Image: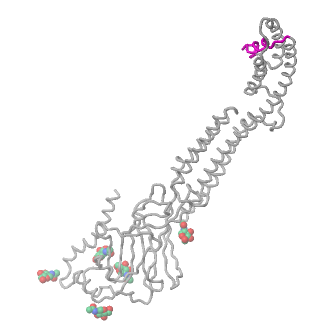
């Protein structure tokens, strides 16, 4: 469709109505009137290329018609635009009113353009400009009877943008085209915007930007060699942030929520909780990197940075919470175990004294070892604690007494096993600390489960507050900017 439009436009440029009409009119022209070629030849014969001889400066009227806009590139901070650039000035030396011509205007050959004076208007800030040639240069020159010259170029321009990514991805970018006469200051050439300075062929929509408006202005700048007229057109683009909502904000919400799952796990599930935390952290980091990949490395803080770093901090905080819970439960366990061990030591000493006495008196310790290896006996000892074990011992030793007479003398191995055996309930106890015991030191006020319960409320709450502040701050700024742009126009 765009192509067809372009073709039609080209057709308009090359087959201007004046030409078509002129063809019909030419036949009606009186025989003594000159043809266009003859007029041009006569004009050019008596023409020196110089600043039009006038009291005032030459008024050059400028107008652009935006045909299309290419991508706005953040990395190189520029945009591409196709424009039909029109300049209109009056050069009395080119007036052919005195000649017997039946036409009010002549469409000149573009090759004659370098031979006539031109204000040399240029886009002073463009990075790259070329005249479309499809297939020959798209230039139109019309000369009016009174000497007014109308020049139109179809240009592809790459021009800079004032990239400000502070609000990214809710940012509004402005791109500017600046027109100046390259060779004449404002004493010789005055630049003006035409009444309708900028016109659009159709609504401009880039893949990730909408053009919200444009603004033209005129300035008079002081250069070392005088004042120069400058015309500026500013295009304002608003980023379509839908992409970033889908690709950045929604996934981070999900990641953050997933990181809270670890609060629901018991404090002992350390590997699972670590995995959840670390993978959330990694997911966020990769997402962040992916988005920043397509942006220039600016040193200020973007809205996206605030968001991503905020989210990463939240996941980081869950890891800190995990470390805290882990530390507390480990510390409190070790205190509890130390207490138990002390108690156990006391008990086993009591027991050892008693049994040793009996074994010594009987001369055997063998039977007691066997009874300790009895699984039922062992289990009872673990579950009920030391008292049970202690109660059991005298029975065992009693039984031993009867056995002892038939068995051999006590071996050192058996004695060793007795002492080893008494250690077993201790290590098993370490794994199951179900009885809350008085904890001294190690922040005894905190209970790991309670910290998790607190976090499962506090984290979402803090995240909600972060969200409120974030969205309130950035969205209000964006809307202010947009309203400004739209309503000032
Ligand atoms: C122009 O001249 C031709 C002959 O040279 C003549 O036939 C014709 O009628 C003339 N036309 C006009 C409009 O005078
Ligand atoms: C050339 O221009 C001058 C001044 O503009 C004029 O007086 C003169 O008649 C012109 N000559 C021709 C041959 O047109
Ligand atoms: C050129 O002049 C003809 C009449 O001679 C007029 O119809 C046409 O609109 C003019 N073209 C321009 C571009 O002004
Ligand atoms: C010259 O003629 C054109 C077309 O008729 C008109 O638009 C323009 O204002 C005229 N210029 C001057 C200086 O009279
Ligand atoms: C247009 O540009 C002028 C000059 O730069 C500025 O003062 C004005 O606020 C701008 N208007 C809009 C709508 O941006």
Measured as percent of width and height from the top left, residue 65 is found at: 40, 67
**Residue beneath the point at 63% across and 34% down:** 272
In depth, the one of 380 and 206 nearer the eye is 380
* Quadrant in which the N terminus appears: bottom left
Q: Is residue 17 magenta?
A: no
- Left or right side of 114 for 404: right
Q: Check the image and report above or below for 446 versus 64.
A: above
Is residue 460 among the parts visible in the rendering? no
In percent of width and height, residue 366 lies at: 78, 13
Q: Is residue 60 above or below residue 453?
A: below
Quadrant of ligand 1: it is: bottom left
Name the dominant secondary structure of the magenta segment: helix
Let me know if residue 373 is in the magenta part.
yes
Residue 484 lies, in percent from the top left, at 57, 62
Is residue 417 something one can see in this rendering? yes
What scheme was used to colour the molecule?
Answer: one colour
Taking the image as shown, residue 468 lies to the left or right of residue 119, namely right
Per the rendered image, the range of residues in magenta is: 362-379
**x and y, in percent, of residue 101 in the image:** 25, 83
């Amino acid at each position: 469709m765009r192509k067809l439009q372009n073709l039609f436009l080209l057709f308009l440029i090359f087959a201007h109505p004046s030409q078509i009409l002129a063809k019909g009119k030419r036949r009606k022209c009186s025989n003594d009137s000159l043809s266009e070629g003859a007029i041009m030849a006569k004009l050019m014969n008596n023409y020196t290329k110089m600043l039009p001889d006038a009291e005032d400066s030459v008024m050059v009227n400028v107008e652009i018609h935006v045909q299309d806009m290419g991508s706005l590139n953040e990395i190189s901070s520029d945009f591409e635009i196709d424009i039909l650039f029109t300049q209109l000035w009056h050069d009395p030396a080119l007036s052919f009113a005195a000649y017997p011509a039946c036409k009010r205007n002549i469409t000149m050959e573009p090759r004659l353009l370098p031979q006539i004076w031109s204000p040399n208007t240029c886009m002073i800030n463009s990075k790259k400009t070329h005249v479309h040639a499809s297939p020959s240069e798209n230039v139109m020159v019309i000369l009016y009877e009174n000497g007014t010259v109308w020049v139109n170029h179809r240009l592809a321009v790459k021009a800079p943008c004032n990239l400000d990514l502070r609000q990214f991805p809710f940012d509004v970018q402005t791109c500017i085209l600046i027109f100046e006469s390259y060779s004449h200051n404002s004493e010789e050439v005055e630049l003006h915007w035409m009444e309708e300075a900028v016109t659009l062929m159709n609504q401009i929509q880039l893949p990730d930007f909408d053009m919200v408006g444009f603004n033209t202005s005129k300035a008079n700048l002081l250069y070392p060699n005088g004042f120069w007229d400058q015309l500026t057109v500013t295009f304002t683009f608003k980023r379509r942030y839908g992409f970033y909502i889908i690709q950045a904000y929604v996934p981070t919400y999900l990641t953050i929520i997933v990181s809270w799952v670890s609060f629901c796990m018991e404090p002992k599930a350390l590997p699972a909780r670590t995995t959840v935390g670390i993978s959330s952290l990694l997911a966020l980091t990769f997402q962040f990197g992916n988005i920043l990949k397509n942006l220039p490395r600016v040193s200020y803080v973007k809205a996206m940075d605030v968001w991503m770093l905020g989210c990463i901090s939240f996941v980081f905080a869950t890891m800190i919470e995990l470390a805290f819970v882990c530390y507390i439960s480990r510390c409190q366990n070790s205190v509890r175990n130390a207490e138990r061990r002390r108690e156990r030591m006391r008990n086993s000493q009591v027991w050892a004294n008693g049994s040793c006495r009996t074994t010594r008196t009987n001369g055997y310790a063998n039977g007691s070892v066997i009874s300790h290896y009895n699984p039922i006996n062992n289990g009872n000892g673990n579950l009920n604690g030391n008292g049970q074990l202690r109660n059991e011992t005298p029975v065992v030793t009693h039984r031993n007494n009867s056995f002892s007479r038939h068995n051999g003398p006590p071996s050192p191995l058996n004695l060793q096993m007795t002492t080893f055996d008494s250690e077993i309930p201790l290590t098993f106890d370490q794994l199951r600390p179900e009885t809350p015991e008085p904890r001294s030191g190690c922040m005894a006020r905190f209970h790991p489960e309670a910290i998790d319960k607190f976090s499962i409320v506090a984290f979402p709450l803090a995240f909600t507050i972060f969200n409120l502040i974030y969205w309130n701050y950035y969205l209000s700024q964006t809307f202010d900017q947009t309203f400004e742009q739209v309503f000032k126009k």
